[in-house]
Amino acid sequence: MSTFFQTLIVGLRLGSIYALIALGYTMVYGIIRLINFAHGDFIMVGGYTVIFTIPLVLRLGAPAWVSVLAAVVVCALVGMSTELIAYRPVRKKGTNMTALITAIAMSLFLENLAQAIPVIGPNPKVSTQIFRAGGIRFGTVTMEYTTIFTLIISAVIMLVLYTFTQKTRLGRAMRCVSEDKAAATLMGINVNHTILLTFGIGSALAAVAALMYLAQYPKVYTTMGGLLGLKAFVSAVLGGIGIIPGAMLGGIVIGLVESFTTSYISSSMADTFVFLILIIVLVIKPAGILGKNVGEKV
Amino acid sequence: MVEKKTPVLETRKLGVTFGGLRAVSNFNIQIYPGELVGLIGPNGAGKTSVFNLLTGVYSPTEGTVLLDGVPLNGKKTHQFVQAGIARTFQNIRLFKEMTVLENVMVACTKDLSYGLFSASFRTPKYWQQEQKVAEKSIRLLEICGLSDVAGLPAASLPYGRQRKLEIARALATDMKVLLLDEPAAGMNPTETAELLACIQVIRKTFGIAILLIEHDMSLVMNICERIQVIDYGQTIASGSPEEIATNKRVIAAYLGE
Amino acid sequence: MNLKKTSNGYLLNTVVIVLLFTAFQILTKVKGSDGSFKLVLVPSLWQCCYLMVLACSLNLVLGFMGQLSLGHCGFMAVGAYTAALLSLACERSGFFTGKSDPMFLLVMIASFLAAGTLSALLSLLVGIPALRLKGDYLAIITLGFGMIIVNIINNLPFCGQDGLALGSAAASLYKNGLGFGSKAKVQFLWFALIVTILSLTLMFMFVRSKYGRAIRAIRDDEIAASASGVNVAGFKVLTFAYSGFFAGIAGALYACTNATLSTSSFAFTNGGILNSTFVVVMVVLGGMGSLTGSAVAAAIMFFVNYQIKNGTWVDLLPSSVKGIFEYPMLVYALVLIVVILFRPKGIFGSYEFSLQNLIPDLRRAAAQRKAARQERKEARANG
């Protein structure tokens, strides 16, 4: 029984990291209908920023996790410049397909640019302990502090984000742009600014996710965003892409599937099950678990 | 007067429900060979829903569609078309990046029975069938006055000619009934006149039945032999243009009470 | 449609292909033992062959049918492993010994066909969700399929992460199976060329038939296609299978070229240019809806990749520029972004190369360029 709970906890923790990343995918997809393949690499950018700023932060006497603030700023800047330099010009000229290829190209670019920077290089870097070591024991089950912080922080972020999109003016503008850009323009919303803001917020979330990830798996390398981003994207699609609660739900589901397959079936088959679940859900419910099926108007 | 024949297209108690909304209910219509019937009604009355039911885009929640007395329940859209019901769309839907000729040839796919092997190795069967279909398509383009633009991409045509191309494409399916969804929408008077002429030619050449949705009342009154009026998914009147023009319920539905 | 002109075109193409092929055979006979021919040109041709077949097969689905598939290399992996395992099985059962055995040719043909067939069958499986899903959703499903295939191959004990890359399997694949060393590559170059030409021709015939018309109609407007009597579901599934068949053939060619198979070569992304992402890139760069474009883009990408890694001219560059070339993917990414910004329809758009129409095509293109220039000049004069 204790294995079960331990697996459950691991799954929830992994799931909340996926959910944070998935939120970035979902927000961008919701607003410009683009799978931002470079989003996974924003995590890598965040990871390196955290690693490089931790010594500075420690010297100032602050706890290690404060370095996430720097990561948030850097990631938001990278995300917004990606939109400005690559996506916006392509969106004006090209089709959906070319935008998608640009996203793939941006992802390749970021990964390899990182490798080409001498201080980063192709070899992994190891991070120091971010949260307090140890944990709380409930009978036979141990809940590490890292896990507790991860769960709490992601829950708070999601709640704040949800409230932001539902209640604030900017949040409403975002939802408005994602529904109908032309109408949003007519309502006096600056569409380009709103998209830029979305990229900023989404990328900042990737930075937070990077911190959570590092707290658990303290290793950064240039291609770390690849599979991590992919699974997060799967989470977003599974929950219903473009829907914020969907991303959370999808993230948790994927995290649980992965941790249970790893501990009960085989760790090398975990990815197979993750994608199998995705395929099954999409075939049954093409718009994802929470998505609404919108037929094409004839 | 129409004598006792089997109608080419007939619906019996046709209806469809979306969620709780009854878009169409108890819809009955009979169209006899060679007839031109108009289907009119205010915005949102369910006209296009009727078309979608008649072409298998929606599956009816009640009732049946019969073609030559044969029910078409459970068939898919392309099977409806192959059985003999073709349509055009309210918002023109052409294969934009293909040429005008190819647009028509796509609709001839069912005439081409050759398989993968014939296509891959270009057997004589392939050549004969392709040649036949190409000739047929060119003939249809001539009828619709489009043969001069056969090699151009469909998207490059002006609006009025795109409408005609849609009709030519529908004709290529060798249908028995042609459904036209607001063919004159967005057209200027000259284009409308040309389109009317085109429809007359088609009727004369092919002797098919046509069901027409239209907003332009003068057009409907001019060319239709029979008109059926629907509102809120239900038939409220049907008869000759003169009868419809004086029908109280129709006037009420259009002008509001 | 002018029948006479078309059949003349076929005759012309056949004659030119046969001539080129004979010339190449003679070249092989004469220069077969020459170092750079044997060690550089022939292996490069083998690599180009499978990349071309692969890119064109993806173009059927992506460019002509407009369905984004991100797991195409998964099907290639199926083909590669099927062909390699079948040839090994035949060798172990004593069906043939060594590559000079006449039975080897038979086994090779059988392996290629089996590779294509199995991969086509698996593609059918992808075709089924494709009936319900479109666009990005389908993209992510195909990506998932690709990952699952590679993951399953990884977990099969007889393929394994490096089952065919290490030990006796790889050794006998080189010695007797479908793995070709540089000498065997020269010896069997004709086979690779024939397979490639045949594959490209078959795909071209597919595109220029009712199938091609139907799937392009589906790409442009699915609802209108079904309203024109096109069985959308049927054509979609068939095209996925047809495309999968040739991905499998490409895989078999790959197995011959690189006898050490490892699943990481077929992943969604990896360090090399062979992965599902880059196949998509080839198709988009070449032009969606142009088989010529895919083939040319595949060859160009291979050439650029080869030059960046092995070209002597790279050494002559100033060291600051050379530094960039140590990260070829960085160069690709930049080139890709630039091409997309300035030529969003790809290099060839939907143009197909044709020997017969080459001169008129060139003339028309020149005239268009001239007209465009004239227009620009006038615009400048007016504005």
Image (cartoon, coloured by chain):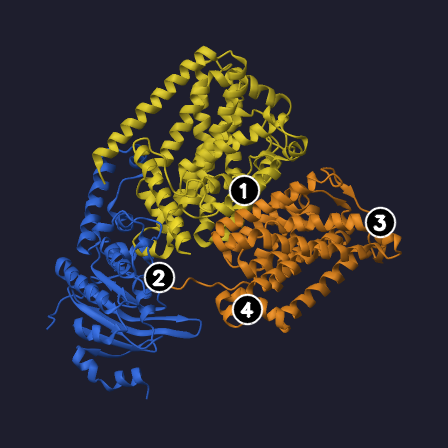
| Residue at horizontal 33 percent and vertical 68 percent from the top | B48
User: What is the secondary structure assignment of the residue under circle 3?
Assistant: helix
Please name the color used to draw chain A: orange
Please name the color used to draw chain B: blue
Residue denoted by label 2 = B57
- Residue A205's disc is none
Q: Tell me the mark number nearer the camera, choosing from 1 and 4.
A: 1
Which chain contains the residue that carries disc 3?
A
Label 3, label 4: how far apart the Cα atoms are: 42 Å
Residue denoted by label 3 = A55
- Residue A176's disc is 4
Location of the N terminus of chain B (image quadrant): bottom left
Tell me which amino acid carries mark 1.
Answer: Leu
- Residue reaching furthest front? C381
- Residue C336's disc is 1
Q: Are callouts 1 and 4 both on one chain?
A: no
User: What is the secondary structure assignment of the residue under circle 2?
Assistant: loop
